[in-house]
Image (spheres, rainbow, N blue to C red):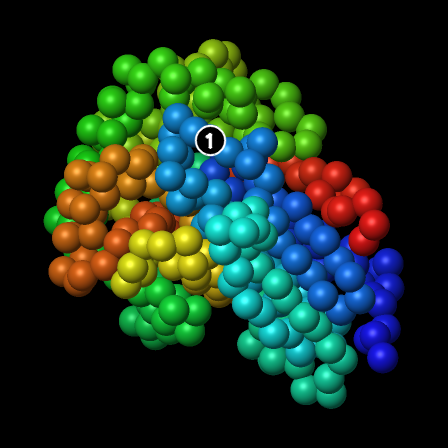
Amino acid sequence: MREQKLSRHQIDVLVGSAIAAPSMHNTQPWRFGIDGPDIEVFLDRSRALPAEDPTGRALLIAAGAAVFNLRCAAASLGFDSWYRLAPVPEEPDLVARIIVAPTATPDPDLAALHPQVSRRHTSREPGRPAALTAEARASLIHAALSEGADLSWLAPQGAQDALRSGATALLHGWADHARTAERARWIGGERKEDGIPISALGPRPTVFPPPVRDLGAGLPGRGRSRKTFEDDPVLAVLSTAADGAVDRLVAGMALERVLLTVTQNDVQASFLNQALEYDDSRSAVQQLTGRPGFAQMVIRFSNSPISATTPRRTIADVLAPDS
């Protein structure tokens, strides 16, 4: 007998949580299908970034983050969840299947993280380096490991080297007209459903290399102030042992677990991933960790004001019509 269908409220909580996940330039490249207790996660390739993300790595990381939010939402609703990461040649856009079922003992760790889904926002504001205790850093390492990824804290010199790699990549990006045109499609102006509005870009850094990615660099941006950022940022590299499609989905789940965990501590995060968009500088960033693997994200942790939020698509826009 077919399991009972999810209620409209349950669907809204599950999918509403999923679409709160971070994605490069806030493209929100996902679609969802629901059949009974089964939830399928698909890529929406019309929202891909072929110039800045030609291999689709960021696309898969975003989908993985959405999967993790689904799991947290399921636990908050009193469900157990089982998932399978499912990128196969026959269905290249289907990346994950999740099954939920009522339980008296939902995962307490996932349920505890769910309130952070709505609190988590990328901060592109200046601030103080995050004063993370050894215990707090260990908890973030554990968060990444529990999803199958590694989180490596960079020493001060390593952080400066990462900033320089990012700065070199940034200069390459400014000279690439395809990249600039792609960013202009998604960044700046007033945004109601996706992309990053000018209000969420944060101020322009006064120093170079900056400890935050200035996504508005090279684009029209009247009204943005200039401010000084910290010169000794706290940076960590999220990496995986391999670099296939499943590994990138795993990186997305690990990323979101790290972000929700640090949000519990009222610490903000932002990303410095421009160096990872080029093979040579990506390898150089991974070498800074002193470990083998493939760098997937560079994360800045800070005590900063929360930036203006970015918009989200509606649930109806991302949900299959027959769900």
Image quadrant containing the N terminus: bottom right
At x 61%, y 80%, the residue is 107
At x 28%, y 27%, the residue is 170
Of 229 and 172, the residue lying toward us: 172
268 w.r.t. 195: above or below: below
Quadrant in the picture for residue 8: bottom right
Indicate the position of residue 174 as horizontal and vertical percent values. Answer: 31, 18
**Numbered marks: total:** 1
Mark 1: few/some/many CA within 10 Å (<14, 14-19, 20+) = many
308 w.r.t. 70: above or below: above
Decide if residue 318 is on the left or right side of residue 285: right
Decide if residue 291 is on the left or right side of residue 137: left
Indicate the position of residue 166 as horizontal and vertical percent values. Answer: 25, 35
Indicate the position of residue 76 as horizontal and vertical percent values. Answer: 70, 71
Q: Is residue 112 visible?
A: no
Of 40 and 172, the residue lying toward us: 40
